[in-house]
Structures are given as C-alpha cells and as structure tokens.
Image: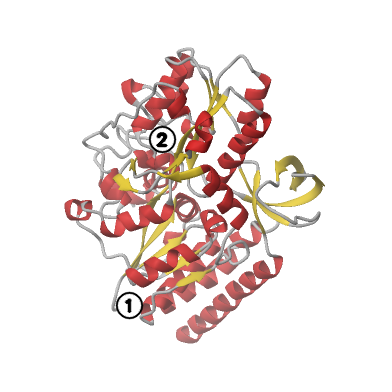
C-alpha cells in the first residue's frame, strides 16, 4: 500500500510535473513538495511526490553496504583458512 | 531503474549476510519486528530470512493498511455504493477485501454498485468534476504516507467549489499501532514474544520524520532503525539492530537517510493537520480498538465528510473465530500455525486480514515461502 518509487522529474508545470521511470512518463502532483527542480529524483506515491531523494545520501548508503560486506567476507575468509 | 536496482544487488547482499552472521552473538537470540508490509514483502520476496542466522528472527507487524482495515469499514463503503447509490472511488488495494454477507467491493460492483478504481485521490476529484450529476465518495485508506494526498484532494474540492465530492476517511497512524503492540491488554490474552527492536517505516517516515519513534526508543528501551523497502535496506537495518542490541543501546537510527529526515515533510504534515483530526478510537482488524489511532475530517471540512453526508454508521463485525491474525500480527504465531492457512484461507479467497493484501504476513508467506515448510 505504501508503495512508492524514486522517479526523475523531467518537466515542471506549476504544481504538477512529469516524471520518467525507465522511459515511461506520467504527470504527478507536486502539491506536497516545494522547490523541486528538473533532474531531481522524487519519491512518488499515489500520484504525489512525497519527498526529494538525496543522491549523496544514496551513494553513502551504498558505500556503507559495500564496506560492511567486504569486511565481513574478508573476516569469513580468514576464519576458513 | 536508478535508486532501485542498486539496492537489490545480490553480491552486496552476500556481504551484508556475512556481516549479520558475524555480528549476531550465538549465545542469544534476536527478535525484530518489521512494522511495515513493504518490509514483510521484501523479506519474503527476496528470501532475506534465508540469509539470516537461526537466532535472528523477523516478526511481521501490522503495517499494512489493507490488512488492518476492519470489515465494518468496508461494509460502510459497500452500503454507500449499493444503498446510497453513490459513485464509490477507491484504490485498487481495497477491492478484494472480504466484507460481510460474502461481499467485497468487487462483488458489490458485480451487483450493480458504481465502484471505480482510481490511481490517485486527484483522479477521484476529477471524476466528481466530470460527473456533476453523481455523488462521488472517495474511500480513503492508508497510513501517514497516503493521508497527505487525501488532504490535498479535499482542499482541491473545496477550492473548486465541488458539491458532489466527499471522503470516507479510514486513515490510521503508525505510532499508535506500535504502542498498542507493546502494551495493549491483549498482550495478556495472546502472550507476547520478547521484541528486541523495530525496523521503522520507510515511506511513512518520509512524511512524519524519524522524531516520533524517539519515544519508543526512550520509553520502552527498544531500538528502532528506519529502513527503505529494498532488500539491502532491510538487511542493513537488521545489522544495525543487532549491533544496538549487542551494545545495550536503544536509539533511533536512520538507514533510509536518502529520503527521511528527523522532521519529515512539514508541508505535508501541516496539510494533514489542517484537514484531519484524531478520532478518540478506531478499530483495527487484528488489533481491536486502538485509542487515538485514526483520523477523521475536521468540522471545517464537514461537507466533504461522507460519514456526515450519508446515513452510514460503523458497525463492528467480528473476525472469523478460527483466524489467527490477531496472534500473527503480534508475532506470537506464524502464518503456518493457523489451521486456515493455505487451506480455506488463500490470497484468492482470503478469510483473515493477513491474507488480504500481498503485503500481509500470510499472503507473503503463501506466495514466496510456503514450500519451504515442507523441506
């Protein structure tokens, strides 16, 4: 029910914008969000942008996954040898 | 798709799985509740539980608005369509929910009710604009994620001066449900499992922020980690919870920092506060009556409140006696412990709340995990 997807904003028209998800375009509402710019990623739920996605934080989170995993796999390999 | 595929990467999942196995102390067990149906679905669909050590168990919480919608509220929507003759618009999720007299909204439509599925609350407003001769009621369900769009629709209808649009509000609040799980009187009836921590909601938290969970961390000494709905998000959150438990900490941490801040979306919060107010109590399927857990429309917007406009009263309807949803929603029983599971109760013919939506604990286990029970 709370399904929401990160989508790229490709055009803005007042309180509405057009988003692009893998080439599929749809018009959604920006009534819940101020200061959205073209090229931003927003999280879309039932036709409304809920929040902006922070690309820097996304990169940091992915880097953290990789770091945690690498350490653990190295540790696991040491235990085997 | 960007910002989705990266968070489903199998190689990274192996690493996180190893990290969880190393962090988990073999001399103790860990019970974590993922509150949201979105997390339940991700855990089942991507087999996250198979990557966890045996002493880390995930308990599926009641965070699926379709599952917790009581029969009596669906009955109200059906009466609006069949008896009051309104055009009832609703999200697709509610159409199959079983109601009284072997009905559902889908079956009520087959009986001639004018019931329409909409993608967005804005589409319901459009429907009212296009059909001034009809009374359009929007059957609104959902947690804090879905409430702001309903508030916008009501404000929009007011601005347009629509006289044929109203809303049957069944919006509910997550923090009240979490409190209920931790301290309701039913805990005595069902017994309780020791919960060591919570995975906090993803998209609900984009709206309400991480602050509301601080109370649970402090008051109940339970760690909370807010996590996104992708499988790697869930695994990272489990790792963070295991570490908090090991270190004896109980704080709110935010794994979903790419979308959630401490304060949340203030514009959306203000819109909701302007249009909605707390109900003294609201019945949840599986949790019974939970105080201050639902929202109704403020009297300033009474003309858009379907409960005030039409003669439909809420009548509570008991769940099927053999259904174990109440115990399952609290983590005391597993779906496969229920006699109805997979026999009488299936996603095609759901008896209880947890089988209704694909995000429910029973439906997720039926779809992705039931064959494992026979191995």
What residue is shown at x 61% (from left), y 36% (from top)? B153
Residue in the foreground of this view, choosing between A34 and A59: A34
Residue in the foreground of this view, choosing between B132 and B4: B132
The x and y percentages for residue B53 are: 38, 69
Would you say B258 lies left or right of B253 here?
A: right
Co-location on one chain, circles 2 and 1: yes
Q: How is the image coloured?
A: secondary structure
Residue in the foreground of this view, choosing between B313 and B4: B313
The image quadrant of residue B289 is top left
Residue B212 drawn above or below residue B73: below
What label sits on residue B154 in the rendered view? none
Would you say B326 lies left or right of B49 here?
A: left
The x and y percentages for residue B60 are: 37, 54
How far apart marks 2 and 1 lie (CA) works out to 37 Å
Disc 2 crowd rating (10 Å Cα; few below 14, some 14-19, many 20+) is: many
Instruction: Pinpoint the chain carrying mark 2.
Output: B
Residue B4 drawn above or below residue B101: below
What label sits on residue B26 in the rendered view? 1
What residue is shown at x 68% (from left), y 46% (from top)? A31
What residue is shown at x 37% (from left), y 66% (from top)? B216
Would you say B187 lies left or right of A5 here?
A: left
Mark 1 lies on a secondary structure that is loop
The x and y percentages for residue A27 are: 74, 40
The mark that comes first in sequence, 2 or 1, is 1
Residue B85 drawn above or below residue B75: above
Residue tagged 2: B347
- Residue B279 can be seen, yes or no: yes
What residue is shown at x 80% (from left), y 47% (from top)? A12
């Amino acid at each position: 029910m709370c399904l929401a997807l990160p989508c790229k904003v490709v055009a803005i028209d007042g309180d509405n914008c057009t988003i692009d998800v893998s080439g599929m375009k749809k018009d959604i509402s920006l009534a819940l969000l101020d200061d959205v710019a073209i090229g931003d990623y927003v999280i879309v739920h039932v036709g409304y942008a809920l929040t902006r996605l922070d690309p820097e934080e996304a990169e940091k989170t992915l880097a953290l996954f990789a770091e945690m995993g690498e350490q653990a796999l190295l540790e696991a390999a040491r235990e085997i040898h | 798709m960007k910002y989705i595929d990266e968070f489903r990467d199998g190689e990274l999942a192996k690493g996180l799985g190893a990290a969880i196995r190393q962090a988990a102390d073999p001399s103790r067990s860990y019970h974590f509740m993922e509150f949201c149906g979105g997390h339940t679905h991700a855990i089942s669909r991507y087999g996250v539980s198979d990557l966890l050590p045996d002493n880390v168990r995930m308990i599926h919480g009641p965070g699926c608005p379709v599952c917790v919608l009581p029969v009596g509220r669906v009955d109200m929507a059906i009466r609006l369509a069949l008896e009051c003759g309104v055009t009832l618009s609703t999200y697709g999720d509610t159409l199959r929910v079983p109601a009284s007299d072997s009905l559902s909204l889908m079956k009520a439509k087959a009986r001639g009710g004018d019931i329409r599925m909409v993608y967005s609350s804005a589409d319901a407003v459009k429907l009212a604009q296009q059909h001034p001769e009809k009374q359009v009621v929007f059957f609104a369900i959902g947690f804090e994620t879905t409430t702001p769009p309903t508030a916008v629709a009501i404000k929009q209808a007011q601005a347009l001066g629509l006289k044929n649009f109203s809303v049957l509000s069944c919006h509910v609040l997550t923090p009240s449900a979490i409190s209920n799980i931790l301290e309701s009187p039913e805990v005595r009836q069902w017994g309780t499992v020791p919960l060591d921590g919570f995975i906090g909601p993803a998209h609900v938290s984009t709206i309400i922020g991480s602050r509301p969970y601080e109370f649970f961390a402090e008051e109940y000494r339970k760690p909370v980690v807010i996590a996104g709905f992708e499988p790697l998000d869930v695994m990272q959150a489990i790792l963070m919870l295991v570490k908090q438990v090991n270190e004896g900490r109980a704080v709110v941490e935010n794994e979903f920092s790419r979308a959630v801040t401490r304060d949340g979306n203030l514009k959306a919060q203000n819109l909701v506060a302007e249009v909605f107010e707390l109900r003294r109590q609201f019945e949840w399927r599986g949790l019974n009556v939970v105080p201050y857990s639902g929202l109704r429309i403020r009297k300033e917007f009474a003309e858009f409140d379907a409960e005030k406009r039409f003669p439909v009263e809420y009548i509570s309807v008991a769940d099927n006696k053999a259904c174990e949803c109440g115990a399952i929603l609290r983590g005391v029983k597993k779906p496969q412990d229920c006699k109805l599971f997979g026999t009488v109760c299936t996603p095609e013919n759901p008896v209880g709340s947890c089988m209704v939506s694909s995000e429910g604990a029973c439906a997720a286990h039926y779809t992705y995990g039931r064959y494992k029970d026979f191995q």
